[in-house]
Amino acid sequence: MNRDEILARSRQENQPEDEREQFVDAKASLFSLSTMIVLVVVLCCIRHFVHGGIKVHDLFALLWGTFAVRYFYRLWKDRRKGNLAIALTTSFLAIRQFILYILEG
């Protein structure tokens, strides 16, 4: 292979995702987060009403932690200050719920 062929292959491999792939990824992300929220709410209701009020700190730590990671990633990609505020807030809530889970069970 000559230099031009190598450069052409490299450019082709480093092409950014096309718009359809980005759209599908965004929809998949939204769908998975929505599903997680619904599942957390259902599990919280089951724990509260069926199992007599068992604490749900672990579920909320999972939920807030997922949102924190999502917004830190978005902050890393687009540097918007709104993402920083949401990332820090959800991180605080995730850590708080995790500590409550450790202390209270």
Image (cartoon, rainbow, N blue to C red):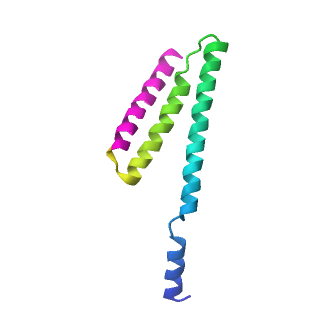
Residues shaded magenta? 82-105
Q: Does the magenta segment cover residue 67? A: no
In the displayed orientation, state which residue is furthest to the bottom: 2
Q: Does the magenta segment cover residue 95? A: yes
On screen, residue 42 above or below 52: below
Q: Residue at coordinates 60% horizontally, 31% vertically from top-left?
A: 38
The quadrant the N terminus occupies is bottom right
Image quadrant where residue 46 sits? top right
Picture coordinates of residue 91, whole percent (x, y) = 41, 34
Q: Residue at coordinates 35% horizontally, 42% vertically from top-left?
A: 82
Picture coordinates of residue 5, whole percent (x, y) = 53, 85
Picture coordinates of residue 96, whole percent (x, y) = 42, 25
In the image, is 45 to the left or to the right of 70? right
In the displayed orientation, state which residue is furthest to the top: 52
In the displayed orientation, state which residue is furthest to the right: 50
Q: Residue at coordinates 49% horizontally, 81% vertically from top-left?
A: 7
Tell me how many marks there are.
Answer: 0
On screen, residue 13 above or below 76: below
The quadrant the C terminus occupies is top right
In the image, is 77 to the left or to the right of 14? left
Picture coordinates of residue 9, whole percent (x, y) = 54, 79
In the image, is 3 to the left or to the right of 92? right
On screen, residue 51 above or below 98: above
Q: Label the magenta part by its dominant secondary structure.
A: helix
Q: Residue at coordinates 39% horizontally, 37% vertically from top-left?
A: 86
